[in-house]
Amino acid sequence: MGQNITRKIIASHLVEGEMTPGKEIALRIDQTLTQDATGTMAYLEFEAIGIPSVRTELSVSYVDHNTLQVGFENADDHRFLQSAAAKFGVKFSRMGNGICHQVHLERFGVPGKTLLGSDSHTPTSGGLGMLAIGAGGLDVATAMAGYPFYVKMPQVVNIRLHGKPAPWVAAKDIILEVLRRLTVKGGVGKVMEYTGSGIAYLSVPERATITNMGAELGATSSIFPSDDVTARFLAAQDRAGDFVELLPDPDAQYDEVIDIQLDELEPLIALPHMPDNVVKIADVAGQKVDQVFIGSCTNSSYTDLMRVAAILKGKTVHPQVSLVIAPGSRQVLVSLAENGALADLVAAGARILECACGPCVGVGQSPCSAGMSLRTSNRNFEGRSGTVDAKICLVSCEAAAAAALTGKITDPRDLGEPIDIPMPEKFPVNDRMIIAPPDNRGELELVMGPNIKPLPVASPLPGEIKGEVLLKVGDNITTDHIMPAGAKILALRSNIPAISMHAFERVDATFAQRALDAGGGIIVGGLNYGQGSSREHAALAPLYLGIKAVIAKSFARIHMQNLVNFGLLPLTFANEEDYDDIEPGDVLLIEDARQRLSDNNVKVRNVTRDKLYPVKHSLSDRQIEILLAGGLLKFVKEKI
Ligand code: F3S
């Protein structure tokens, strides 16, 4: 049976498990990347593992999310990240060098390798034939320590792109079409593998636009073959030696096949507030636009911005529109500066921002109240832009540029003849903003300013767990309830003692102090406890506050994994009505916890009410071992 690309890479990196979709497998990780919003925690976690250097082929630490330094906190984080990179053998991509995924594609991605990144858009590097997966910081820290990455074996979906894209149809329109068809849940547990005659018309950065937004499908990853197009891109980056051909076998098997005729596509737009709320631009053209943002890890490559420059050349941005452009990397910006396109953009009225995430992550340039903002980024969730009532639409660079000129949503086909931007034969390669780790690493110290605090580490699971019910919450408690976000709290992400004081503050503002005063305790939850993001701090803060166990009616999957990773015991009621019996302040006791956990026969005694509640868990043997060891860090330490 012929192999597809995904299975070829998995087979060559398989450490444990069977390649049966849905079954847990362990993968060897060749490369890792972190960004500053997740990296501080990942390197504190790596330090706690206690090995001197990373054991990957390559690890890179990027600073791209919080580059605005309005207080000392972000600057402290950047200093810490730089010192951690030097000490642990990690390359450090300095502030202003660009967005992690764009720079990784340009300078480090290698076809056929595995990449694990502490950012959900890590699959961007699938554009040059890598198996690139996003994960939590602790997973990346353990991968840096040489421990494999555990994930469910994905199904592989073949998306066949047929023919040449119709005029003014961009790579963005292709992924918007996939989102339109499959929705934001359509990729869960799957890798999207692109093939077909149409891929020959897509450059590596265009392919990366498509793999980038596979994250919006919920996909494990997305990938393109490594072919002649890939070879030319790598050669233009002075990296011809990194090229390896990687194609599916002619009779490759897939779990599902989807066909898209590129010559039949039209320019598309994702309307507020979901990336899969996709319609034809022609159907909504004419609506007033207040802001246009061109940038992000989705659409800020050389060809993207050259097309924008060609559209804007000699024209002027509409008086009611604020046009902001953030080039994806310093290499892109230098290219535009050298060939004069930057002058065309500035002359037309574009405001050039730093090469960073910027407006994509709500760092600056929030739209006006109730404003309409057309963006080339990948997410248009309500409030993400920093303006609660703003309407964010996602479009291609061409459609964004067209709207910047007209002041309204505009079908780019109205611009006339399409623009052809050839890929340069050589990019202006200059890695001076990427600092390689020195040789004398053993002597180096981590620089920890006041915003960097040590990581709390759990103890091995005790035989007896006793504690007061400090909080009883209802159904569907999200990670936002447990550990709120927002600029003020985000800046404390490397300061667990400070950030922990915000835990559950929207539910019960007294919780954190009560937990500290009581020396810890137990939380009781309803259904779907911990739903939402993969936010590690939703487990780290309770750990810091001394929480020993969470007993709920049910858990959201990722949060339960995070509780296990940080050594907090997640238990579910065998009889849901026992939830009603427990009141805040009751004292609960779990005897013989270690043995009973392994036997899945745990009982919780309500000492206050003299009752006994049977509880259960759905933990794998590996997860039980992690809990017994006192969390993933300790578990990995014992294995290494
Ligand atoms: Fe940055 Fe936005 Fe991408 S925050 S990594 S540009 S999704």
Image (cartoon, rainbow, N blue to C red):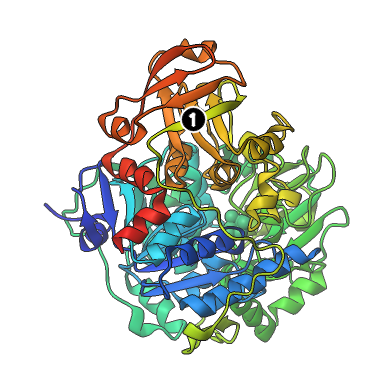
Q: Residue at x 30, y 24 (%)?
A: 601
Q: Which residue is at 37% across, 84% downward? A: 240
Q: Which residue is mark 1?
A: 466
In the image, residue 58 lies at what x, y percent? Answer: 41, 74
Residue 106's x, y, as percent?
Answer: 49, 75
Question: For the residue marked with disc 1, what is the amino acid?
Answer: Lys
> Where residue 632 sits: x, y (%)?
40, 51
Quadrant hosting ligand 1: bottom right
Q: Nearer the viewer, residue 266 or 132?
A: 132
Q: Residues within 10 Å of mark 1 (few under 14, many from 20)?
A: many
Q: Residue farthest to the bottom?
A: 439
Side of 433 where 366 appears, left or right = right
Nearer to the camera, 510 or 98:
510
Which of these two is toward me, 366 or 77?
Answer: 77
Image side of residue 82 versus residue 131, left or right = right
Dot 1 lies on which element? Answer: strand
Q: Is mark 1 within 8 Å of ligand 1?
A: no
Q: Number of marks in the image?
A: 1
- Left/right placement of residue 418 relative to residue 10 reads right
Residue 210, percent from left and from top: 47, 55
- Image-quadrant location for residue 500: top right
Look at the image and tell me whether residue 422 can be seen.
no
In the rendered image, which quarter contains the C terminus?
bottom left
Note whether residue 429 is visible. yes
Residue 111 to residue 24: above or below? below
Above or below, comparing residue 575 to residue 256 in the picture: above
Query: Is 183 situated above or below 233?
Result: above
Q: Residue furthest left?
A: 1
Relative to residue 225, is residue 178 depicted above or below? Answer: above
Q: Which residue occupies 50% across, 15% down?
A: 579
Residue at 23% in and 55% down: 7
